[in-house]
Each structure stands twice: as C-alpha cells, then as structure tokens.
Amino acid sequence: MKVALDTSVVVAGLVEDHPHHARAAYWLRARRKVQCVASWHAYAEAWAVLTALPIEPRVTGDVAAGVLERLRRTVSFVSPRTTTYPAAVARCSARGLRSGAVYDALHLVTAEAEGSDLFLTFNVQDFARLAEPGGPRIAAPADPPGAAR
C-alpha cells in the first residue's frame, strides 16, 4: 500500500506536543507493506512550520533540516513532474478555488501521480474538494492500534 502524507501529518508526527502526534507518528515510522510518500513541497512547508512554531526553545532552521533529513529514512519525498503545477492550477481554476488551495492541490496531484492508495491529512475537507475519481482515498489518520481511547 502506498500512503501519501500532507504537511499537517508530517508536522504533527514530528512535534511530540502536537495534539495529533500519536495519530501521525504512527505513519512516519517504517513499517512493512506500507510505503509513505510526500511531495517536496511538503518538505519545504514542514520546515517553514517547524521553524515558526511558538514553542520554547525555538526550532532553528538547522534543527528542522536535520529532523526532516532523518525523516527521509521512512518517507520518500518525491519531485514534481512537469505536469504537476499546471495540473494543480487547472484543478483549482475548474473548481473556482483561489489562493492557497493550489498548494493543497500540489500535494494531491503529486499523490495521484505516485499511485497512492491513501492520502492522509488533518484537513480532509480542504482536500476532498480537490479529489478526482479514481484518486487516493482521503482520510485523517486514525488512532494507532493499541492507543488508549
């Protein structure tokens, strides 16, 4: 199974104090039969978010870069294809969406191009409006097996 991750899942999985940490971190760990992918755009967004978090001590650019580099052991960050950006723009335009919706579209178009079966995000509605028939199922990460409820 190939699982694509949105920036919201990457960041939550990396920040232990994040309210969704356990749900996201489960997917960031290497496991059999699951290949996790994310766009390089998610890598850059995650760095931006990590370095802007209002936590003490502040996350420096070097620390954020190091954390993301270690994450590359379990998540494959994929480059956009020549059609990725035009497809994302066209999808937003066709749906009457504007502004930052194009960044969500970049993640989803990349996941589709990679043949992902599942797209995980904590912003399901933002991505559901961009979904195409036959694309990956869009869902929020569930509680990991064995988690206290």
Image: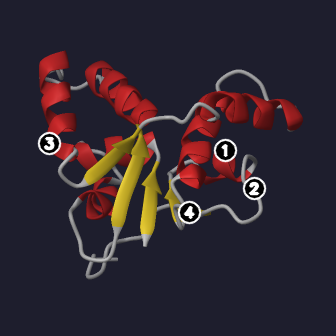
Q: From this viewpoint, which residue is outermost toward the front?
A: 82
Query: Which amino acid, mark 2?
Result: Glu
- First reached walking from the N terminus: tag 2 or tag 4: 2
Estimate the x, y position of residue 87 in percent, counting from the top left: 71, 35
- Which mark's residue is nearer the viewer, 1 or 2? 2
| Amino acid type, residue under disc 3 in the picture | Arg
Question: Residue 49: image x %, image y %?
Answer: 36, 26
Cβ atoms under marks 1 and 4 closer than 8 Å? no
Q: Quick check: can you spot residue 38? A: yes
Q: Nearer the viewer, mark 2 or mark 4?
A: 2
Left or right relative to 120: residue 49: left
* Type of amino acid under label 1: Asp
Disc assigned to residue 132:
2
Task: Indicate the secondary structure of the residue bearing disc 2.
Answer: loop
Q: Residue at x 22, y 45 (%)?
A: 72
Query: Going from the N terminus, do you reach mark 1 or mark 4 first?
Result: 1
Q: Which mark is residue 126?
A: 1
Q: Are marks 2 and 4 in contact (CB under 8 Å)?
A: no
On residue 70, the disc is 3
Distance from disc 1 to disc 2, alpha carbons, whole Å, reads 13 Å
N-terminal-most mark, 3 or 1 = 3
| Residue indicated by mark 4 | 139
Query: Which residue is drawn at the image coordinates 75% and 55% (left, top)?
Result: 132
Q: In which quarter of the image is residue 146?
A: bottom left
- Residue 77 locus on image (x, y percent): 35, 42
Label whose residue precedes the other's in the sequence (1 or 2): 1
Q: In this view, does 15 lie above or below 63?
A: below
Q: Which amino acid does label 4 sit on?
A: Ala
Q: CA gap, disc 3 to disc 1?
A: 28 Å
Categorize mark 4 by other alpha carbons within 10 Å: few (<14), some (14-19), many (20+).
some
Sequence-earlier tag: 3 or 2: 3
Marks 3/4: CA distance?
25 Å
